[in-house]
Image (tube, rainbow, N blue to C red):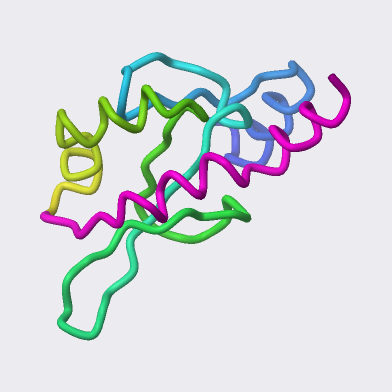
Amino acid sequence: MPSRTRERSTAARSGHQPERRCVGCGTRRPQAELIRFHTRKTEGEALRVVPDASGERLGRGAYLCPRLACLELALRRRGFQRAFRAAVELDENELRDALKNRPEDNEQRQVD
């Protein structure tokens, strides 16, 4: 049986890119094209959805296409609650800001 490290290095050499599903539209896309969100406990022990700018936070994450239409679908369909398997608090303005302030999008706008 091959070791896990050997499997990972083989995947890296083959050019494999991990894919994730958008919690809004349900489309599978490369992980690098999506915005990752995670939960943080608030003072009242409730879970609050916040953007994961580095994409390296531990634990369950939810991914969203960088489009406002996908955010609206996720809110309407309770996509974040389903992805985190829990009742979560959502600050819609904070989520919209995460979409607007995405570094890749800003770089593309400057080039165009």
Displayed quadrant of residue 47: bottom left
Question: Is residue 50 on the magenta stretch?
Answer: no
Which is more toward the observer, 53 or 56? Answer: 53
Write the start and end of the magenta stretch as one range. Answer: 87-112
Which is more toward the observer, 41 or 74? Answer: 74
Task: Please state the horizontal and vertical placement of residue 80, each as a whole percent of the image.
Answer: 24, 42
Q: At 37% from the left edge and 22% from the top edge, which residue is drawn? A: 69
Could you tell whether 12 is left or right of 91 in the image?
right
Could you tell whether 47 is left or right of 106 in the image?
left
Could you tell whether 26 is left or right of 8 in the image?
left
Could you tell whether 65 is left or right of 88 in the image?
right
Is residue 37 placed above or below 28 in the rendered structure? below
Q: Main secondary structure of the magenta part?
A: helix
Q: At 22% from the left edge and 34% from the top edge, which residue is drawn? A: 79
Q: At 63% from the left edge and 31% from the top edge, which residue is drawn? A: 32
Residue furthest bottom in the image = 43
Residue furthest left in the image = 87
Which is more toward the observer, 106 or 64? Answer: 106
